[in-house]
Amino acid sequence: MLCYGDNCDCCCIQVATCDANGLWQVGALKHNYVALETYPFISPLFTATRYRGELSPDELILAELRDFIAGSEEKGKIIWDYLACDNRSETDLRNYIKSFISMTWTMAT
């Protein structure tokens, strides 16, 4: 989950998801932008749970996103802005997070 807004409209909970081609995109959780090929349609709002298990090596980007966002909706919006402009590869997303952290660290010193 990237941001949850003011909860006044149907698209306020925004998430990042990776499609079958490995491209990352954003969309509304309520409208099922996390599993576009499901039938019957059931909003993930009814079935979402927090995953606490170990991630496989190809899922480690999720830990990187979690660590970067760290509960900050502001940082979630930074990722949303980056992904909303264009579908990005995992490498693109990883590099963006690293460059943002590096830029922020440089500005702090």
Image (spheres, grey):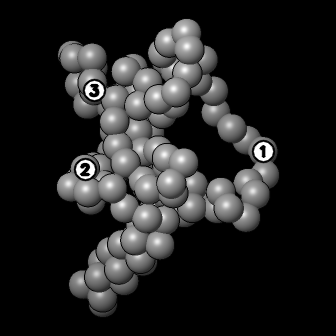
Marks 2,3: beta carbons within 8 A = no
Q: Can you tell which of label 1 and label 2 is closer to the viewer?
A: 2
Q: Amino acid at mark 3?
A: Cys
* Front in this rendered view, residue 85 or 108: 85
Disc 3 crowd, CA 10 A, few/some/many (<14, 14-19, 20+): some
- Image: 31 above or below 50: above
Rendering quarter of residue 75: bottom left
User: For the point 29% across and 82% down, which residue is it?
Assistant: 103
Q: Position of residue 99 (x, y in %)?
A: 35, 80
Q: Position of residue 36 (x, y in %)?
A: 47, 29
Mark 2 and mark 3 lie on one chain; the one further toward the N terminus is 3
CA gap, disc 2 to disc 3?
Answer: 14 Å
Q: Amino acid at mark 1?
A: Gly
Q: Position of residue 96 (x, y in %)?
A: 36, 72
Q: Can residue 66 be seen here?
A: no
Element type where label 2 sits in the image: helix
Give the residue at mark 1. 53
Give the residue at mark 3. 12
CA gap, disc 1 to disc 2?
Answer: 29 Å
User: For the point 51% across and 57% down, which residue is it?
Assistant: 22
Mark 1 and mark 2 lie on one chain; the one further toward the N terminus is 1
Quadrant of image for the C terminus: bottom left
* Front in this rendered view, residue 26 or 102: 26
Mark 3 and mark 1 lie on one chain; the one further toward the N terminus is 3
Number of marks in picture: 3
